[in-house]
Image: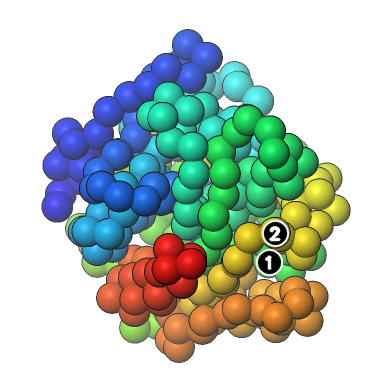
Amino acid sequence: MTLDDWQAGGKTFDFDGRPVFYRDNGAGDALLCIHGFPTASWDWEPIWAGLTARFRVVAPDMLGFGFTVKPSQHVYSIHEQATLHERLLKTLGVERCFILAHDYGVSVAQEMLARFIERRGKAGPEIRSICFLNGGLFPEMHRPLLIQKLLVGPLGPLVSRLLNEKRFRASFLQVFGAETKPSDAELRDFWRLVTYNDGDRIYHRLIKYITDRKRHRERWVGALINSPVPVRLVNGPEDPVSGAHLVAHYRQHVSNPDTVVLPGIGHYPQVEAPRETLKVVLEFFEKETAT
């Protein structure tokens, strides 16, 4: 499927007066896919056919990402993105779902899990289980790239203005495995998603999630450690941001940790190793559907 096909097959829903792009395909148990920074729901395309063969899969482009509106003066937050996902599920009539989350999306899923724990027995989406891919589950183990450090600092607005495709490619390629880097065509698609609706000019606003993670560490890590639903971590260990070092920390702090490490893979398991990632993701969710 091409990126144009992906966009053409999507829909939009109104989130507080702003149109949000999403994909909704397949049938059966609902699976919510939450993408990462700086990309979009397109990240799930390599495993989309496999997921939709088993689930009704819902995957939005969050506010500020992909084909969704990108207000230039907006204060973006993980909490608002969690509300966006909950609102979309409600709009679609989804009351129970599995969650597959990556990168920025793991924090969104952690906030959704914290809310689920707080409202047990009350109205709201029921989370059946969560599968995390590479992401900052523990903010103290997140190792940002140089460009991320610059973007989140006082020079962030300037760095956003100076961003171009060449610089994007150079930094983006750093998080992939040595043998699993995206092709030129794939990189063009990623850049197209970033620049759609001038998204490259709000990088410094979107990346404030790094600050969010530190501020809400106890809430989000607490939800993970005390999760009432099954959780699995699927990790590409070659990722310099949240790879092997994250897995080691996760195993030390989460009771009975369920982890799957994909050798040679970097930050984007679903893109770099779609077949292997799909297999372990489906295997995990099938355990819950069988009970």
Position of residue 210 measured from the top left corner of the image (x, y, whole percent): 70, 49
Q: Which residue has dot 2 on it?
A: 228
Q: Amino acid at mark 1?
A: Arg
Viewer-proximal residue among 79 and 287: 287
Position of residue 200 measured from the top left corner of the image (x, y, whole percent): 45, 37
Q: Are marks 1 and 2 in contact (CB under 8 Å)?
A: no
Ranked by sequence position, the earlier of labels 1 and 2 is 1
Marks counted in the figure total: 2
Q: Amino acid at mark 2?
A: Pro
**Residues packed near mark 1 inside 10 Å, few (<14), some (14 to 19) or many (20 plus):** some
The reply, left or right, for residue 59 in relation to residue 86 is left
Within the image, what quadrant is residue 112 found in? top right
Q: Which one is closest to the eye, mark 1 or mark 2? A: 2
Residue displayed at 29% across by 39% down: 24
The reply, left or right, for residue 128 in relation to residue 286 is right
Viewer-proximal residue among 132 and 159: 132
CA distance separating discs 1 and 2: 28 Å
233 to 208, vertically: above or below: below
Viewer-proximal residue among 179 and 45: 45
**Secondary structure of the residue carrying numbered label 2:** loop
**Residues packed near mark 2 inside 10 Å, few (<14), some (14 to 19) or many (20 plus):** some
Which color scheme did the rendering employ for the protein?
Answer: rainbow
Position of residue 171 measured from the top left corner of the image (x, y, whole percent): 48, 61
Image mark for residue 143:
1
**Secondary structure of the residue carrying numbered label 1:** loop
Position of residue 133 measured from the top left corner of the image (x, y, whole percent): 51, 66
Q: Is residue 77 visible?
A: no
